Amino acid sequence: MDLEAILKQYWGYDSFRPGQRPVIEDAVAGRDTLTLMPTGGGKSIVFQVAGLARGGLTLVVTPLVALMKDQVDNLSKNGIQAVFLHSSMSRREYENVWQKLARDKCRFLYVSPERLRSERFVEDLRLLKRVNLLVADEAHCISQWGYDFRPSYLEVGRLRRFFPDIPVLALTASATPAVADDICRLLKMRDGRRHSTSFARPNISYVVRATDNMIKQAVHILNRVSGTAIVYVRSRKATSEIADMLNSYGIRASAFHAGLTFEIKERLIAGWKDGSIRVMVATNAFGMGIDKADVRIVLHYGPAPTLEEYYQEAGRAGRDGKQAYAVVLYDPARHIKQLHARLTATFPPRDYIKELYQLICNYIGVALEEGEDRLFEFDVDGFCTTFRQYPQRVLSALNILGASGLMEYVDERENASRVQICATRDELYSLTPAVHPHAEVVMRALLRRYPGLFSDYISISETRLCEDTGLGNEEVYEALKSVSRAGFIHYVPRKRASYVYLPSRREYPEDVKIPCAVYEDRREIMKKRLEKVEQYLSVSGECRARLISEYFGQDAENCGTCDNCRAARHKSGSATHARNEESLLNGCLRLIQTRGAVSQEELNRCFPASRQQLNDILRYLIDNGAVGIDRVGNYIIK
């Protein structure tokens, strides 16, 4: 099958990005394949094109419910039928998905790794006899040495025994050589092909600023570089605090974190995409799966805990290939101590972890020697309030319990409300005030705003329905519940869903074992990761982009654009170099003043013999406030 024709038909692109086609060809040919493709490299299109080219059903395992929902929505918009399954779906929704699969209506099935533990699910999948490609997205989660280990990901490797002749395509944006080896081993790859796109992002300038006044530096940088920005912080509380401070300086900013309601998240993302919100101050819950290519700056307000996480988050800048910046602001006196303290916080004492295991079992109502292979709803906040525990310490202990095979925490965040219409259009006309006084007006608003309700479950917003009808939240909610009870619709109200899964029966206290490989070995690995972050922050005279590439096992030249590379060149410059720079600086200013807005490509054409020097000059002009970058990446006079 013509791969370019598939790409053009469904996505409208004429050609693949560098590195995409070889991966697709291997997967289509039936070869087990691992690809390391940095953030923004187009991983989703790789496995989606491969799945369409192979035919049949592609099973996609991904750890993020929000991401699978976004991808299913995007595929549907492109005319490709796809469905997903996750733990908080109702039985009716689950059966609805399987009816579609049985009728051969879908090309992609997205599932969370926890779903693979279900014998019923695996048997239903085998009976379909249509699975033709197995995709492990965010594949670093399968490795115990990865920064985001998820024990349930091991089920992907076990699933292969039921589908021995189907190729597996594993994808990740960040994996060290040791983690890549682990992925291939655990997924039982047979002579697996490996593809690795370069981790270099030449259009991103990496910068680190040590300061004891971070908000002042943040405002300075955001005023110097125009366009959309993300400011990453490490706590929910900080999102609101920093957003408020930026707004007080006249910079349009909003706060985003996982604890917001679905409606608020939806509104904020829409505002950020259309430019009415310039800066999103967010935890790492923001950015993944959101398609916005023109982010000009990603600013970390304090260091990320690992270079893997930093690289993924920084990589959300400049996906359009135009000039962008990845900046870390940190206070050496405060943040270096916090990095060292993170090790203790992530690995609480062994005795505490064992006691917590028993406490959680009591809280969810599991007796000794019971609970095997069961999923229990688990309210972390309620648990911490009841037993006076610190949430972060509890989550750290749960992570270790999961790696030990004792208890796994599954946080699916808040799910939007969902509706499917069960009646015909004619039957809807029989709705009367006896069902509910506002039933008719709510149903009319529902039908106007949400197409497709007759054929599938659609995520809805009660807040939007309030705006459309002029009714209050409680009135809309009660109307939907009443119409659902009457059998006209099936209404699944939103809820915040988190669970604990017990892979085996509850152990007696003396039998709770935490292996050295899970505790001591992983602690040592984390210690080395934190040391690499500290090195990245404090290093001088060494290229930051090269340091990142080498961390991921790739050789690299100095980028010439990070703060350290620029500082080294300026330091070694000669008098002739200085005269050339002055001439080039004046030439750039004249050209930008004359044209009003000038692209990078145009400047390169006008000054072809001085590409590197040109980049240095432009950054100097930006840093000193003479020149800025507009929303589309052109240079303008400030």
Image (cartoon, rainbow, N blue to C red):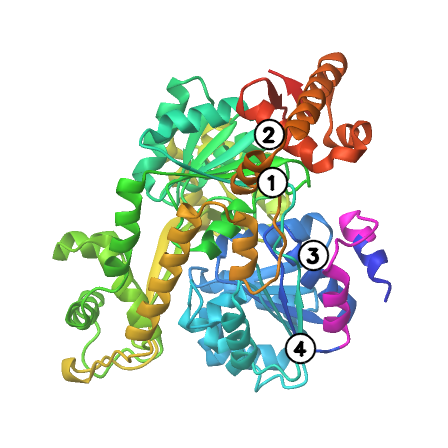
Magenta segment boundaries in residue numbering: 8-29
Q: Is residue 628 above or below residue 15?
A: above
Tell me the kind of residue under disc 3.
Ile
Q: Which mark is residue 388?
A: none
- Between the residue at mark 2 and the residue at mark 4, the CA separation in whole angstroms equals 44 Å
Task: Characterize the local packing of mark 1: few (<14), some (14-19) or many (20 or more) Cα atoms within 10 angstroms.
Answer: many
- Label 3, on which residue? 45
- Label 4, on which residue? 32
Q: Which mark is residue 561?
A: 1
Query: Splitting the image into 4 quarters, where does residue 584 fall?
Result: top right
- The extreme front residue here reads 575
Q: Nearer the viewer, mark 1 or mark 3?
A: 1
Task: Characterize the local packing of mark 4: few (<14), some (14-19) or many (20 or more) Cα atoms within 10 angstroms.
Answer: many
Closer to the chain start, of discs 2 and 4, is 4
- 9 in the magenta segment: yes
- Label 2, on which residue? 619
Q: Position of residue 398 (x, y in %)?
A: 28, 65
Determine if residue 407 is in view: no
